[in-house]
Image (tube, rainbow, N blue to C red):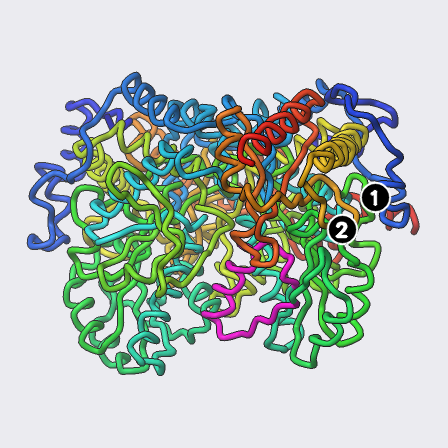
Amino acid sequence: MKEKTVFELSVAGRKGVTLSDCDVPSKPLEDLLGEENLRDSLPMPELSEMDTVRHFTALSRNNYSIDNGFYPLGSCTMKYNPKMNEAIAKMPGFAGLHPLQFEETIQGALELIEHLERILTEIAGMYACSVQPAAGAHGELLGLMMIHAYHKSRGDDQREWVLIPDSAHGTNPASAARCGFKVKSVPTNSEGLTDVQALKRMLNDTVAAFMLTNPNTTGLFEKDICTICDVVHQSGGLVYCDGANMNALLGIARPGDMGFDVMHFNLHKTFSTPHGGGGPGCGAVAVTKKLEPFLPTPRIERARDQYRLNYDRPQSIGRIHSFYGAFLVAVRAYAYIRNLGADGLRQVAEMAVLNANYIRSKMKDAYEIPHDRFCMHEVVLSASHQKKTCGVRALDISKRLMDYGYHPPTNYFPLIIPEALMIEPTETENKETLDAFCDAMLSIAKEADENPDILISAPHNTDIGRLNETVALKQLNVNWLTHHKEKKDA
Amino acid sequence: MSFAPHTEQDIRSMLATIGVEQVEDLFKDIPEDIRLTHPLNVPEALDELSVRRHMLELSKKNLSLDNLVCFLGAGIYDHFSPSVVDAMVSRGEFLTAYTPYQPELSQGMLQALYEYQSLICGLTGMDMSNASMYDGSTAMAEAALTAIAATGRHTVLVSSLVHPNYRHVMRTYLNSAGYNLLEVSSSSGVTDLDEIENQLNQDCACFIVQSPNFLGQLEYTQQATELAHKKGALMIVVVDPISLALLKPPGEYAVDFVVGEGQSLGISMSLGGPLLGIFACKMEHQRRFPGRIVGVAQDNNGRLGYTMTLRTREQDIRREKATSNICTNESLLAVAAAVYMTAMGKHGLRQVAESCVQKSHYAAERLSELPGVKLPLKGRYFKEFVIRLPEYIPPQRLNEILIHDGILGGYDLGRSYLEWKGCMLLCVTEKRSKTDIDNLVASVKMALENER
């Protein structure tokens, strides 16, 4: 640990930000709050303002980001986050709004949300959309709650199963379980696609929904998607689209046209809003007409020239957020879409797919590529060959990439591809970057043959090496205050 | 404009490497009949300057803090955020990073989150905090679901004085999963302890109380905790983090989960999103709690570093057996809160909290001097309080008048509680000066006279 914690930097009596003195007549706090309610001590740090800035600046410099370099983390769509959107999100007319103001005083904000929802509906090829979910997984949860409510509204109460491919994101089964469903896994066939015959055999009147990512997590388009949606519908189930991979489809094809009933977008992936080291995000959900009554309240609607919040929605599943979702994330995504227009959006998908296939072509002699077809916006390699011949695993390759200055791809996902390395270059990377990254990957493949130890012991150029998480678990230290108190007591 | 940098020459050479003629060839797996043959029906592309003009126009259709002096709270608060907060979280290294899956490259974000967790533990007195949830409402719902999993009981008991939207969100979560929700109704300003005792039964997984509650009043949290524990239920307390700079932390009386909205910690109101869900708990819940958490670990050379830990609870590893489906959270806002708490420091946080107390009491006293205005509640409060208006001027009407004076008035409690019809919940933070408060009082006085 290069940098001390704020607690170690603290000096008793030092002050940070200055505030003016309270300018109303004061009374003793004991009288106002009750002595029994007051705390004895407050274990908060004491730093000067500049020390605070130096500390967090030092931390930021010790953190990899898109602004630092190539970040080909598959499934996460780490594209350039335009600076324009940050400037716009800071406009006082957006950042300085209280959610409980009169509707008449937030017309611009409501108009923006309503427009964004309409645009996302068009991109999805659906009927309506809500930007209330705060994350992709939150969108999944909402989608499944609506599916649950839909079946219930039809007296179709026995539908307790959700089918999910074995290649799916972990959030899919976790969201289904959170919503009270039971989960069954649908196998993937040798082509890397949903095994439609197996799916058919699993469908019956106890199945509520099939959840599918398309393009799927092996980077391939589910070419039988229309048949898949048909057979699920014939059994009375609904089809959920995990839209994590929408970067491949913008302006090219629409989930609604494929037969999906409900989908979520990740605005923090597809529409370039920054992920902030883990959030905030927005998991906007789009639905067909039959699910529209179940969308969360309030709905933002236009009546004549006024936008309003409609709470009168008897079939709605209810609220899923304290207010209206991550408004400033919606602001950024809206600005991005207005900047790109229809042609720009299509270009996103085309260039993202071009970049992924370019990497694929350059990798195919050095790494195993499980499925022999063009990929969409990401390519999944397997290091099985390296594992077999030189004892080098996907994790070792990932760690070695750090020495070359790159953030590694997603590894060990999807679970069905052994030693998976999932590379998503996105559309915003130039050819020189892709070439240099491919050179690094080829050089690492060579190192694996000639000097596997250099991979197995990687990374070498970072401040710390691979961390042993089992040690972390035995002496759990997740809170500086108690950990250091315990140490002192001992 | 798609921020795609390729020249035509680049594209030609890349296509040649791939071995296809044109980009369309790469999409041949998509069946013809579902391929779009026309451009998306979205507004035409605008250059940056035009987008910014358009967005500025939209933003000006709103009345914001630039135009209004805010006395509205009810879950989102107009606290002061020092410039250092935005400066730090605007740094691209924090802003444009993903979840820190690769600790060797993400020590900065991981340490900032570890510090956030520790600072939240310091405020709440709890053993451990996760690295954030979506917002206060979902943090509360997740705590209830954690309590259900921990106790094997299927009913959640909640005070009706918990934020109405939080209860609504929890109802949504519990409904779909098939659990029961019971409310302890309260006719006075605080939750009735006898009622809690009456309603707690063997199927109650937890009891939830908010303090200060939605009416701004401090609850008898310690006594409620004892009652809950006596019946084998876990205790969840919803807090205002700013108030904890002065108030006894829930950790001191064996509460199981502390949740709340962290927006007050240096984060803009932003129409209520994105927000920061605070979630802290006792160590004994370490195998069950939802969300990410950062801990300290060692590398092979004995060097210490930060990493996400207790990962076996999480969705990407446990799938349907995970303790929650949380993946994306609100990390950047957690960093903002950490910067805020550090920059304000022990002294600044106390000063902010004390200003809230003094100014809200001053405002309440001045308002109650106006003819017909009453303070219906007698309990202790921190920064929010209730006034009852004369019948001839409903809160909605008063707020319409105040807006014309550039004042964002309080929350109309009749929207959420029949018994508090005609009452308004006002909030006074450290940002309000004596002049602001005196202006509010003058405007209310004028309105009372004119509307009579």
Front residue of B390 and B146: B390
Q: Residue A33's mark? A: 1
Query: In x, y percent, where is residue B162?
Result: 63, 56
Q: Residues within 10 Å of mark 2 (few under 14, many from 20)?
A: many
In the image, what residue occupies the spot 28% across and 59% down? A292
Q: Position of residue B319 (x, y in %)?
A: 47, 65
Residue visible at 29% across and 77% down?
Answer: A154
**Who is closer to the viewer here, A24 or B246?**
A24
Q: Amino acid at mark 1?
A: Leu
Q: Chain of mark 2?
A: B
* 1 and 2 marks in contact (CB < 8 Å): yes
Q: Is residue A374 magenta?
A: no
Q: Which residue is mark 2?
A: B218
The quarter of the displayed image where residue B73 is located: top right
Q: Quadrant of the N terminus of chain A?
A: top right
Crowd tier of the residue under label 1, counting other residues whose Cα lies within 10 Å: few below 14, some 14–19, many 20 or above: some
Viewer-closest of B76 and B260: B76
Give the letter of the chain under mark 1: A
Q: Is residue B161 magenta?
A: yes
Left or right, B191 with respect to A333, comes to right
Residue A413 in picture, x, y percent from top left: 41, 56
Relative horizontal placement of residue A386, taking residue A227 as reference (left or right): right
In front: B40, or A18?
Answer: A18
> In percent of the image, x 47 and y 64: which residue is there?
B172
Q: What are the residue bounds of the magenta stretch?
A: B159-184
State the SS at label 2. Answer: loop
Locate residue B310: give its quadrant.
bottom right
